[in-house]
Amino acid sequence: MTAVVAHEPPAPATQPMPEVILRTRGLTKWFGARLAVEDLDLEVRRGDVFALLGPNGSGKTTTLRMALGLVWPTSGEISFFGQQFAGAWRQTVLRRIGAVVEQPTFYPYLTARENLAGAATFAGLRSSPATQARIQWALEQVGLAPRAGDAYRKYSLGMKQRLGIAAALLTDPELVILDEPTNGLDPAGISEVRALIARLAQRGVTVLLSSHLLHEVQQVCTRVAIIQQGRLISQGNVVELLSASRGVLFGFTQSDGAHRAAEALHRAQLHWAPHASYIHADPLSPGGWQLLVSAPQERAADLNALLVGAGVIPAEVRRYEASLEHYFLALTGGGPQTSMAPAYSLSAPDAPDATPTTFDAPTVATQGGQV
């Protein structure tokens, strides 16, 4: 008799969490009576392009300087590659990191190539053809190869910044830390640095940077941490942080178009479009109200067909996702906000009193009064 043994189906494969390269726990720094960084917990994982964002004076540079051992924390812990950043491990870690913190400084009368040769010596690289090839590669990566024979004192601020990045790349680091890497660069230079960061990420290099150029950060970064007055207020994957603000945006030429559209969608009771908001992108100008519907972006055509069938013709239909700048300003209160007002909201299907709630049309000022 043959015994039959029932086997459970194998569990679905799960993607392992990337290694945490840099972790801080309770990181705090006082400068006399001033608290610069307070109880900061960060996690930078292998393969991240991780941005540290915050208003001026929020503690970004202080955090990077503590991570590199340039400033001693008042309290808290820092670990690299799973080990405490202390003792002999500090020297091992620093050889695996390239960094540019604040404005890089070189010898003014030496050329870019000569300055990088000196930086290579300080980094422990022997003078050899391989080191010279590495210097040439670093210059090419930052777009300075044609000006490698010019004295550093002749460089513009942007060129000096790029030479600092080249120095950070000399040792082929696993982690590159850049403090405001696009500072002083013109649009072409910013684009070059963005492309460089993308190439580093493709090679498997982890990048940690601070920046105030949120548009640039959104284009290149995978994860961000937002700090204000030294405290962490948000951290996570960029796509996931912005996902709650996704939807379908409708624009109308009629002054009452957004209100009529909200009424039509409310009557339709679409469970996959449970609420909507009126948006006025420019509160200082009359008209121009739009309707942002909380619905899967792939259902835009279905929503448009429903509105057309109800006699409401949108002038514009597009996918909508809040920018990182909007998300940042909403958290920090650092700038003007887009004017929004609720349009309708459907109660949860299993709620005890599942009665839909509607809201009045927005009041839009015009030259002749109000609509």
Image (tube, rainbow, N blue to C red):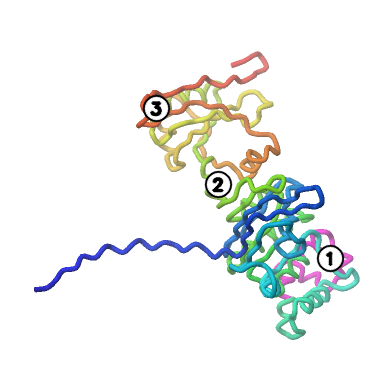
Q: Nearer the viewer, residue 201 or 50?
A: 50
Q: Which residue is mark 1?
A: 105
Q: Quadrant of residue 5?
A: bottom left
What's the magenta bit mostly, secondary-structure-wise? helix
Q: Residue at x 51, y 23 (%)?
A: 259
Q: Which residues are magenta?
A: 136-162
Query: In terms of secondary structure, where does tag 1 sit?
Result: loop
Q: Earlier in the sequence, mark 1 or mark 3?
A: 1
Residue 151 included in the magenta stretch of the image: yes
Q: Is residue 147 left or right of residue 339?
A: right
What type is the residue that disc 3 sits on? Gly
Expressed as whole percent of the image width and height from the top left, the position of residue 25 reads 63, 57
What label does residue 309 carry, if any? 3
How far, Cα to Cα, is label 1 from label 3? Answer: 66 Å
Query: In terms of secondary structure, where does tag 2 sit?
Result: helix
Expressed as whole percent of the image width and height from the top left, the position of residue 143 reads 74, 66
Relative to 311, is 24 above or below?
Answer: below
Q: Residue at x 69, y 26 (%)?
A: 284
What type is the residue that disc 1 sits on? Thr
Expressed as whole percent of the image width and height from the top left, the position of residue 42 reads 62, 56
Residue farthest toward the right in the current orientation of the protein: 109
How far, Cα to Cα, is label 3 from label 2? Answer: 35 Å
Residue farthest toward the bottom in the current orientation of the protein: 128
Label 1 Cα neighbours within 10 Å, binned few <14 / some 14-19 / many ≥20: few
